[in-house]
Image (cartoon, rainbow, N blue to C red):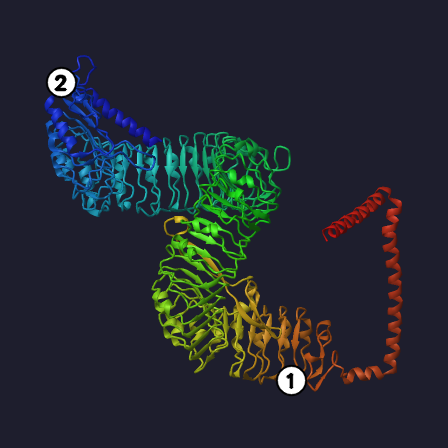
Amino acid sequence: MVVRSFERLLSFLVLLLLCVKPGLGTNLGKVGCIEGERQALFKFKHGLVDDYGLLSLWGDEQDKRDCCQWRGVQCSNRSGHVTMLRLPAPPIDEYDNYQSLRGEISPSLLELEHLYHLDLSYNDFEGRQIPSFLGSLSKLQYLNLSYANFTQTVPTQLGNLSNLLSLDLSFNYYYLNSGNLEWLSCLSSLRHLDLSWVDLGAAIHWSQAINKLPSLVYLNLCGCGLPPFTTGSLFHANSSVSLVFLDLSWNGLTSLIYPWLLNFSSTLVHLDLSSTVLNGSIPDAFGNMISLAYLNLRGCAFEGEIPLAFGDIGALERLDISGNGLSGEIPDTFGNMTCLTYLVVSSNQLQGGIPDAIGELASLAYLELFSNQLEGLPKTFGGSLVHVDISSNQLRGSIPDTIGNMVSLEELYLSHNQLEGEIPKSLGRSLVILNLSSNRLQGSIPDTIGNMIPKSFSNLCYLQELKLDSNNLTGQLPQDLLACANGTLRTLSLSDNRFRGLVPYLTGFSVLESLYLDYNQLNGTLLESIGQLAELSWFDIGSNSLQGAIFEAHLFNLSILYHLGLSYKSLTFNMSLEWVLPSQLGSLLLASCKLGPRFPSWLQTQKHLTELDLSNSDISDVLPDWFWNLTSNINTLNISNNQIRGALPNLSSQFGAYPDIDISSNSFEGSIPQLPSTVTRLDLSNNKLSRSISLLCTVANSYLVYLDLSNNSLTGALPNCWPQWASLVVLNLENNKFFRKIPNSLGCLQLIQTLHLRNNNLTGELPLSLKNCTSLRLIDLGKNRLSGKIPQWIGGSLPNLTILSDYYSKKLCQLKKIQILDLSSNDLSGVIPRCLNNFTAMTKKGSLVIAHNYSFGSYAYKIPPMIKNESYIDEALIKWKGSEFEYKNTLGLVRSIDLSSNNLLGEIPKEITDLLEFVSLNLSRNNLTGLIPITIGQLKSLKVLDLSQNELFGEIPTSLSEISRLSVLDLSDNNLSGKIPKGTQLQSFNTYSYEGNPTLCGLPLLKRCSKDKMEKDSPIGSIEDQIQQDGNDMWFYISIALGFIVGFWGVCGTLLLNKSLRYAYFSFLNKIKDWFYVTIAMNMARL
């Protein structure tokens, strides 16, 4: 606002200077156009292409002969000479499109000897060079060739325009350049110079050239690629120029510019240094620029704290220091900047609370503090604030009620914080945008009548955007939700809360464009009136509890709908075969809707889909040929978990850029098709695909991050083209029929985290190249025919390994992150290493899942390339309680070691009992000897313990009875002896857990220990036991009597003595009886 005001004032002053020149007077005695100059203008017109008829009045007819009446031409009232030629292209729309003249500038303009104002901005001179003859227009005072598509070098002849006051060559988009700026030195009268986005990369001494312009007031060198100041430049840092406006933004300037800047400390009103590389701390010297009204230091890579000296700039109206690395707290001295109307300190690392001094700035209208680490709001905000954005911080506590006092507030953004409590009861009536999403707000939202949506919401009649998504809000949504704003509301987002009840009645919302109600607890049916929202382009109500059917009326009038989300509901699509969807969708999400059994024919009219999800939609049909005509722009396709049949065609040209394809869990047959060259994620698992996968080698890209071909009938050798998929994170080829060796090239996958090759016919040795895959967290090679030497590098080279199945190394102890170790059913020998306590992950509680995060490019919704973040949840087969189970969503909780069915010798190392979060230990079917570690009772989380079929001896440690979670125990077929320790846990197992130990005795075995037998035969013991038993029996009967008396009279006595309670109790019983009666009667009637 200040910049525009200043530019208008400066333009006015320049025009005022021009207007006082001789020849510009009143219209009295006006002289007509001079014929020679009219002909010169005609020649100028003939050099142009006028596509929009802007110069249609420039004619030779009698009524058009006076060139002083032509568009853009102004003549002297005294002499008739053309003095001004103003032909800036008028705009067509708000998207920078103009009614531009095209062509070239004719030299005939030289005949306009009295021309002092020339403006040809926003036209299109098609990459031509600025004509050098313009330097001969000696009386020219104003020259504007901005936005005119000139290229090549600025002619130095422009330096001959000694009378020039204003020169604007800006925004010819870096195709215009100037080797140096020495030609400026002759423009001693120049007051306004704008060379924005002119390439000045070769103008090494640009600052010296500026210093030679004594009259210069306005200088804009934004985006010129200025060479940085050098040490030598500092000798010429002094300047007598009195700059008022200076813009050096978007250049590679460093802190060496400061001495030159300080020349203008007393005169500068506007200073823009944004998007430079000043680095370091913000100097206190800015506090000396006492006239400064505008200061922009956005994106300068500043660090450190905000200087207190900013408080000394009392005239400052606009301050932007966003996009830096500033830390510390916002200083209280900001309260001294009483003229401040615009403050942007976003995208830094600021901490602490927002000072109350900022909230007390009476003139502040625009405040942005988003993307910091701020924790507290000020006690109050100024009444002049119109825009407040404090999103993406760490704000805690509740939203203060003083928000309601901000009567001028139009836009409030507090999203992505940690705010709690309820939405304030009072909000400013002027609100246009309210965004409180991604917080921890709770409670229902009470309305004017007391149940829903705050009273303040009923007064928000100008509201255009309301976002409350991703909170913990509850309660029912009223049917007349936000009725006051039904003529203004454009976006309503209430998704990811716990709202319940029916879908609100929104028919009257004539301009509603985006409606998000997904991930709530809404029930009932979807009203057909939703089809009357003619402006609706985004609609998502997925993941609720809606039922019923979707009819044509639901979508009847939604002609501009782009996104439709109805996923994860029990909705049935009931459309006629002839029905045509009235809009061309970009995104269609119908997962878990009932679309089948036939493939929905109404889809074939959709030509612009970028995202399609028909997963789990009860389709049991052959995929129609026309389906692949829909996918030419698709970036995300999911038709998984259906019963779709047929063969997959050549898909190399069927998708958009960087597609994510999921066709898993269907009945597709045939071979793997040729795939798109930029595929990022591919899941063809759980189908009936067969033959070789060598065709995959035709996909030579570095974008593929996820490949799942598991549970098919694929055969042949694994291809040897893995280096071309360097970005691969997840590879799952398990449960197929692959054979031969694992190729060495698999070791080129340095980013891979999960490798599943289980249950194939792979042979040979594990390739040494896999040691390069240092990101591996899960490797499953079970049920193959691998052979050869045991690799020694697994422990040392794979430090992130979490799950290892079916391979063994002496360096296993280096796997500190291992959670599941399955080396069962191998031919391992030797002793169990004592260093197993290095498995530190088994000493800590785990998360529910083992998930791997990965990213890949996405073109969803036709946005420019963006990064899409995904998470893959690992799964593994684990032997548990004697059977093999697949774990996925709880895999992260499992801590297991299975070394069963090997030839291991020696003792069980006591160090194994240090793994305190252990849940399963299986060492059965080995040749282990020695004692069971006496400290085994430390494993309080142990649920499965199998030490059977070894040669263990000695007594069972008494601490074993202290493991209360133990549900599976097998100590059979050893040489254990002595008495089974007493304890409810150990006696609860059947005899199979202990048999095969000849000298073991005690319950639950029938064999009694000799000590127990002696105690039983002793008469003294018998008498004492009898006395004890009699005493126990007496107290048992006394307890029964007391319990009956207290229980009976505690209930019945209360009912007898309290009339109101008795009445309520029997009324409750009557209601229960009536409910049972009605329920049974209705069920009988249905039968």
Say which mark, if any, is on residue 974.
1
Viewer-side residue, 573 vs 368 = 573
Vertical relation: 939 (above or below) 956: above
For the question of whether residue 527 can be seen, the reply is yes
Q: Quadrant of residue 314?
A: top left
Vertical relation: 528 (above or below) 267: below
Residue 151 location, x and y as percent?
19, 42
Residue visible at 73% across and 72% down? 984
Residue 507 location, x and y as percent?
54, 36
Vertical relation: 347 (above or below) 71: below
Q: Determine the secondary structure under disc 2.
A: loop
Q: Amino acid at mark 1?
A: Asn
Task: Give the labeled residue for mark 2.
Answer: 79
Vertical relation: 742 (above or below) 1034: below
Residue 697 location, x and y as percent?
35, 68
Q: Determine the secondary structure under disc 1.
A: loop
Viewer-side residue, 511 vs 241 = 511
